[in-house]
Image (tube, rainbow, N blue to C red):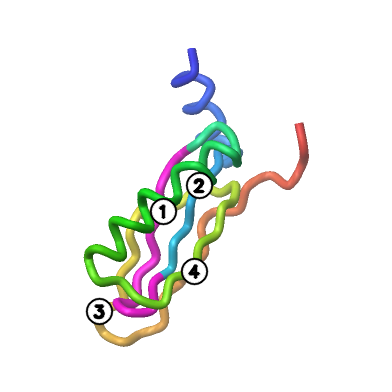
Amino acid sequence: MKEVLLSILNFLGLAWWIEIITHKPQCTYYFGPFLTEKEAELAKTGYLEDLEMEGAMGVDVFIKRCKPNELTVEDDLGEKIDRKASPAFSGQF
C-alpha cells in the first residue's frame, strides 16, 4: 500500500526528495522518493557519507517536494548546470 501511495505522490510531484549539490565535482544528485520530509531527513546522512567517500566536496543539501527529470546531473564541460527539478504543487494536505 505504501508503494502505491508513494507512486501517486511522486507522479503528482508531491513526494519528498533529497537534492545534493556538490561543487567538486559539479553534480546534482536526487535521492528518493520519500513519503515524508522526516523520512528523507533520516536517510540523507547515508547518501552524504557515500558521496564524501567518493571524494565529493562542497556539498549543499536540500529536502524538498519535486519531481526530478534526472537523478544525476553532471557538469563535465564546465558549463552551467540547470539544477531545476519540475516544480511541485505548493499546497499542504
Q: In the image, is residue 68 above or below residue 10?
A: below
Q: Nearer the viewer, mark 3 or mark 4?
A: 4
The majority secondary structure of the magenta stretch comes to strand
Residue type indicated by callout 1: Tyr
Q: Is residue 74 left or right of residue 59?
A: left
What residue is disc 1 on? Answer: 30
Location of residue 35 (image quadrant): top right
Q: Nearer the viewer, mark 4 or mark 1?
A: 4
User: In 3D space, how far apart are the residues under numbered discs 4 and 1 (Cα atoms)?
Assistant: 12 Å
- What range of the chain is rendered magenta? 22-33
Q: Is residue 32 left or right of residue 78?
A: right
Q: Earlier in the sequence, mark 2 or mark 4?
A: 2
Residue 41 drawn at (x, y percent): 54, 46
What residue is disc 2 on? Answer: 17
Residue 34 drawn at (x, y percent): 50, 36
| Disc 1 crowd, CA 10 A, few/some/many (<14, 14-19, 20+) | many
The stretch drawn in magenta includes residue 75: no
The stretch drawn in magenta includes residue 31: yes
What residue is disc 3 on? Answer: 76
User: Residue furthest toward the right?
Assistant: 92
Q: Earlier in the sequence, mark 3 or mark 4?
A: 4
At numbered mark 3, what does the secondary structure look like: helix, strand or loop? Answer: loop
What residue is disc 4 on? Answer: 60
Residue type indicated by callout 3: Asp
Q: Earlier in the sequence, mark 2 or mark 3?
A: 2
At numbered mark 1, what does the secondary structure look like: helix, strand or loop? Answer: strand
